[in-house]
Amino acid sequence: MPATPTLEAQLLHLRLDGWCIVKDVIPREEVAAVRESVAEATLRHQRPDAPANIGHRTGLINYDQSFASYLVAPHFIELIRATLGQNVRVSFTSAMINYPGNARGGLHADWPFNQRNAGHIPAPYPDVVAHLTTLWMLSPFSAENGATIVVPGSHRMETNPSAEGCSHDEDTPYPTEIQAAGEAGSVLVMDSRMWHAAGANRSDSARVAMAIRFAPWWLNLNGLRPGSGERARQMAATGLTENEVEAVKKDVYARLASAVQPLFEHWVEH
């Protein structure tokens, strides 16, 4: 069995290639229960505007907390904090179920680098890690079931295919792209500037995952807040839509472990 990468090795991988995989964040004997809980919550609270063949629920923490304690698993959160600083915050919690027959998605970068969002950092980007996207493999990720496609090194590019004028079309595979395969319980950590896409699910089983994103204390999240003036101004100025992250309910927050609460305290409902 290969040796577990050190924190230093993971940081180097993240810095040079833009991504790495942290294994066994959810222990193997516990991941099935989390997968079933997340899948059930997603089915029960499915977003009506979710694309075909996709199960999707934003604001997942309000609907399911089975994963919450693993957010501070030591060998995971130390990588997040070593990259973004000690005072990190969760910006998004989303369930994403890729059902059989789901087609490949387009190459893009995530908020705040997706140029189709009202609150985006304009290209060309500064070369700084401003946001991390973590994809939690509640099912094994394989080429057959649609493991996330990544373009290593693309986080150092000044733009991405969501921007007008990008030299690469979002629906055209990139020559050096690969699929990030891993075992259930592992987490794909990537710089949110990374070009990536959902793979096509050619299997007969659903691929269950969560996208949990992390921000440093200094990144302005107010454009994601429902009803905020800043959100309204961003959309009016750009003519674009924006993600909306519902506030964490007070009773949900109160039930979170004390070590987990600091990740969400900035987003608790008033």
Image (cartoon, helix red, strand yellow):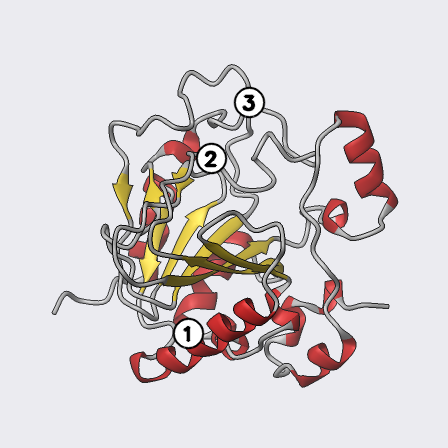
**In the image, which is nearer the foreground, mark 1 or mark 3?**
1
- Look at the image and tell me in which quarter the N terminus lies: bottom left
- Rendering quarter of residue 79: bottom left
The secondary element bearing badge 3 is classed as loop
User: Real-space Cα distance between discs 1 and 2?
Assistant: 26 Å
The secondary element bearing badge 2 is classed as loop
Q: Position of residue 270 (x, y in %)?
A: 86, 68
Above or below, 121 relative to 188: above
Q: Position of residue 41 (x, y in %)?
A: 55, 73
What amino acid does circle 3 point to?
Answer: Pro
Q: Which residue is mark 2?
A: 108
Q: Residue at x 25, y 31 (%)?
A: 176
What amino acid does circle 1 point to?
Answer: Arg
Q: Which residue is mark 1?
A: 35
Above or below, 90 relative to 196: below
Q: Position of residue 95 (x, y in %)?
A: 52, 62
- Rendering quarter of residue 34: bottom left
Above or below, 69 relative to 226: below
The secondary element bearing badge 1 is classed as helix
The mark nearer the N terminus, 2 or 3, is 2
Q: Image check: 1 left or right of 85?
A: left
User: Real-space Cα distance between discs 1 and 3?
Assistant: 38 Å
Q: Image check: 21 left or right of 245?
A: left
Q: Position of residue 207 (x, y in %)?
A: 36, 61
Q: Residue at x 60, y 76 (%)?
A: 260
Q: Which residue is mark 3?
A: 124
What amino acid does circle 2 point to?
Answer: His
